[in-house]
Image (tube, grey):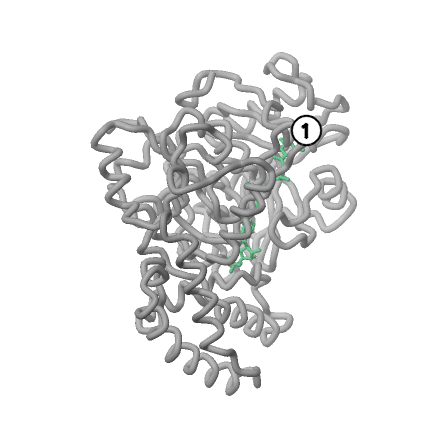
C-alpha cells in the first residue's frame, strides 16, 4: 500500500492548524477519517471570508467527492454532530449519507458524560485538568468499563437503547448524588431524545472499518485527520494534563480499524510558536508581553471553548519527541505570520532539569524543566501575502530552515494566514500538493 495515504497530526498541544492542512489535502483523497477524540476538537477552515469551526465532522466536507468518516476510536456526541450538520447545511455545505459515514463501534457521549466532566472539574478546583467539558474523559472511561457503555450502533435499535439507558442513568444518578450532591437526570426523557438522534443519523451509521479496508484493497487514497496534539496524548503526553485518547499517528490503526501500514505519509503540523489551553506544564510559556502579543496577533482563543490560550516560544525539543513518536515524514508550519514584528525570536532546543541537561525528552519531568534557547533575528515585514519561499524576508526563511535542521525533517507547507489560499508550498514534499 506504500505511502498512498496521508496522516495529519498535531505535534504540540493541539490547535496547530490541522484543519487548514487537512482541507488543503482533502481534495487529493477519497476518504477523510477522524480516528481519535471527539467534540473537544475545534478545527478551523476558512474559505474566503467564511470561517468554519469543525468539532466532530471531518474537514473533508469542503472538498467534492470526499467521503468523511468518524472512526470507531472517536467518542461521538450525536447532539453536537446534528447541530454541526444543521449549521453546515444552513451555510450551503450539504452533508449526507454519501459524504459522511459514522462507525457503529464509536462510543456515544451522553449528557451524563458532559455532566460528569463538569462536576469532576469543579470538585478538583485548582487541581483541575482544564478540560473542554465535552464529556470526553467520562465517555472513554465508560468505554473501558464496558458495562456502562453505549455505542453508535445502539442508537439505531430503540429497544436496545432504552434497555441500556434506564439502568445506566439510575447508576449515574446514585454516583453523582453521592459524590457531588447532584440532582437526578430523567432517563425516559433522555432515551426519547437519543432515540430521535438515532433515527436522524441512521442512514450515516455503518461498519466504517470494513469500508476503509476495502478502500485500501482498491488503492483509494485516505487521509487520517488527527485531533488534539501529541503532548495531549493519553500515553505519551504530559499526563495527567492530557486528553483521553491516542492522538499521535500510533492511534490511527486502532482508531480507524486499518492496518498499521495504512498510516502512509505522516504530516506533522506545528505552529511557529507554542500554545496550550487548559492546565499543565509548559516550559516555553511566556506569561508576559511576548505571550500576550502572540495571543492577540494569533487570535489565540479556543475554537471550542473560547478560553484564552497560553502562548510561548517554539519548543523544538518537544516537537522532535512528538515527530519521532509519529514517524513524521514532513512538517506543515502554520501561523508564521504571527511572528512578524518581533525583534528576535527564540527556539527552545533542550531542557535543563535540576541543573542537568536532559538527554531524552520525558514529558513526566516537564514541571521542573527549564528551557535552553537559541535566539534568531526577527523580521518586521508582514508576510500574509507571501506565496513563494523567496517572498519571505530572509530572517523568516532562516527561522524555517533552523526548524528543519533541528527536527531533521523538511517543511513542506507554510501557512501565513487563516484563509485557505494563504500558504507557501516550498517543495513537492507532501504527496498530492503542488
Ligand atoms: P486545529 O485545531 O489544529 O485545526 O487548529 P485551530 O483551528 O483550533 O486553531 C488554529 C487557528 O489559527 C484558527 O483560528 C485558524 O483559522 C488560524 N490559522 C490557521 N493557520 C493560520 C495562519 O497561518 N496564520 C494565522 N494568522 N492564523 C491561522
Ligand atoms: P484540536 O483538535 C487544544 C485539551 C483541553 C485540556 C485537555 C483535556 O482542536 O487541536 P478534554 O476535554 O480532552 O478532556 O481536555 O486537552 N484539549 C485540546 N487543546 N486543542 C484540542 O483539540 C484539544 N482537545 C483537548 O484544553 O487541556
Ligand atoms: Mg483546535
Q: In the figure, is residue 294 to the left or right of 173?
A: right
Residue 249 position in % (x across, y down): 37, 42
Quick one: label 1, few (<14), some, or many (20+) residues within 10 Å? many
Residue located 50% across and 64% down the image = 135
Q: Would you say residue 13 is visible in this rendering? A: no
Would you name the residue on which mark 1 appears?
337
Q: What element carries label 1?
A: helix
Residue 360 position, x and y percent, is 43, 46
Indicate left or right for 432 with 269 as reference: left
Q: In which quarter of the image is ligand 3?
A: top right
Q: Is ligand 1 closer than 8 angstroms to the Cβ of mark 1?
A: yes
Where residue 38 sits: x, y (%)?
47, 53
Residue 174 percent location from the top left of the image? 46, 85
Q: Is residue 88 above or below residue 390?
A: below
In terms of depth relative to the viewer, which is nearer, 419 or 234?
419
- Horizontally, residue 213 falls left or right of residue 297, namely left
- Seen as rendered, the residue at the extreme top is 390
Question: Residue at image x 59%, y 43%?
Answer: 53
Evaluate whether residue 341 shows in this view. Answer: yes
- Seen in the picture, residue 307 relative to 433 is either above or below; the reply is below
Quadrant placement of the N terminus: top left
Amino acid at each position: 500500500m506504500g505511502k498512498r495515504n496521508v496522516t495529519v497530526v498535531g505535534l504540540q498541544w493541539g490547535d496547530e492548524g490541522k484543519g487548514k492542512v487537512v482541507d488543503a489535502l482533502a481534495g487529493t483523497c477519497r476518504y477523510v477519517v477522524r480516528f481519535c477524540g471527539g467534540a473537544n476538537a475545534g478545527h478551523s477552515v476558512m474559505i474566503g471570508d467564511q470561517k468554519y469551526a469543525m468539532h466532530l465532522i471531518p474537514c473533508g466536507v469542503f472538498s467534492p467527492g470526499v467521503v468523511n468518516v468518524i472512526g470507531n476510536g472517536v467518542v461521538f456526541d450525536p447532539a453536537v454532530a446534528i447541530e454541526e450538520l444543521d449549521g453546515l447545511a444552513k451555510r450551503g455545505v450539504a452533508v449526507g449519507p454519501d459524504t459522511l459515514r459514522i462507525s457503529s463501534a464509536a462510543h456515544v457521549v451522553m449528557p451524563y458524560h458532559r455532566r460528569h466532566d463538569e462536576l469532576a472539574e469543579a470538585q478538583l478546583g485548582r487541581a483541575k485538568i482544564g478540560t473542554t467539558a465535552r464529556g470526553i474523559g467520562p465517555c472513554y472511561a465508560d468505554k473501558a468499563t464496558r458495562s456502562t457503555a453505549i455505542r453508535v450502533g445502539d442508537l439505531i435499535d430503540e429497544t436496545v437503547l432504552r434497555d441500556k439507558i434506564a439502568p445506566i442513568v439510575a447508576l449515574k444518578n446514585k454516583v453523582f448524588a453521592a459524590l457531588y450532591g447532584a440532582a437526578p437526570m430523567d432517563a425516559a426523557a433522555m432515551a426519547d431524545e437519543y432515540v430521535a438522534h438515532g433515527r436522524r443519523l441512521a442512514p450515516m451509521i455503518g461498519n466504517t472499518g470494513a469500508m476503509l479496508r476495502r478502500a485500501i484493497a482498491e488503492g483509494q487514497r485516505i487521509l487520517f485527520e488527527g485531533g488534539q496534539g501529541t503532548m495531549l496524548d493519553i500515553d505519551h503526553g504530559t499526563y495527567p494534563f492530557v486528553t483521553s485518547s491516542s492522538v499521535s499517528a500510533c492511534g490511527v490503526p486502532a482508531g480507524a480499524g486499518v492496518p498499521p501500514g495504512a498510516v502512509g505519509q505522516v504530516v506533522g503540523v506545528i505552529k511557529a510558536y507554542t500554545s496550550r489551553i487548559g492546565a499543565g506544564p509548559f516550559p516555553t510559556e511566556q506569561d508576559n508581553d511576548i505571550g500576550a502579543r502572540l495571543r492577540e496577533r494569533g487570535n489565540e482563543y479556543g475554537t471550542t471553548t473560547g478560553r484564552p490560550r497560553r502562548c510561548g516560544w517554539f519548543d523544538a525539543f518537544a516537537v522532535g519527541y512528538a515527530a519521532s513518536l509519529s514517524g513524521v515524514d514532513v512538517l506543515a508550519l502554520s501561523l508564521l505570520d504571527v511572528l512578524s514584528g518581533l525583534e528576535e525570536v527564540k527556539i527552545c532546543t533542550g531542557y535543563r532539569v535540576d541543573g542537568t541537561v536532559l538527554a531524552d525528552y520525558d514529558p513526566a519531568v516537564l514541571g521542573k524543566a527549564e528551557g535552553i534557547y537559541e535566539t534568531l533575528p526577527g523580521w518586521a515585514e508582514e508576510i500574509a501575502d507571501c506565496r513563494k519561499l523567496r517572498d519571505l524576508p530572509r530572517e523568516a526563511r532562516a527561522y524555517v530552515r533552523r526548524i528543519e535542521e533541528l527536527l531533521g525533517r523538511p517543511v513542506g507547507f507554510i501557512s501565513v494566514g487563516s484563509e485557505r489560499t494563504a500558504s507557501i508550498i516550498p517543495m513537492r514534499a507532501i504527496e498530492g500538493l503542488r
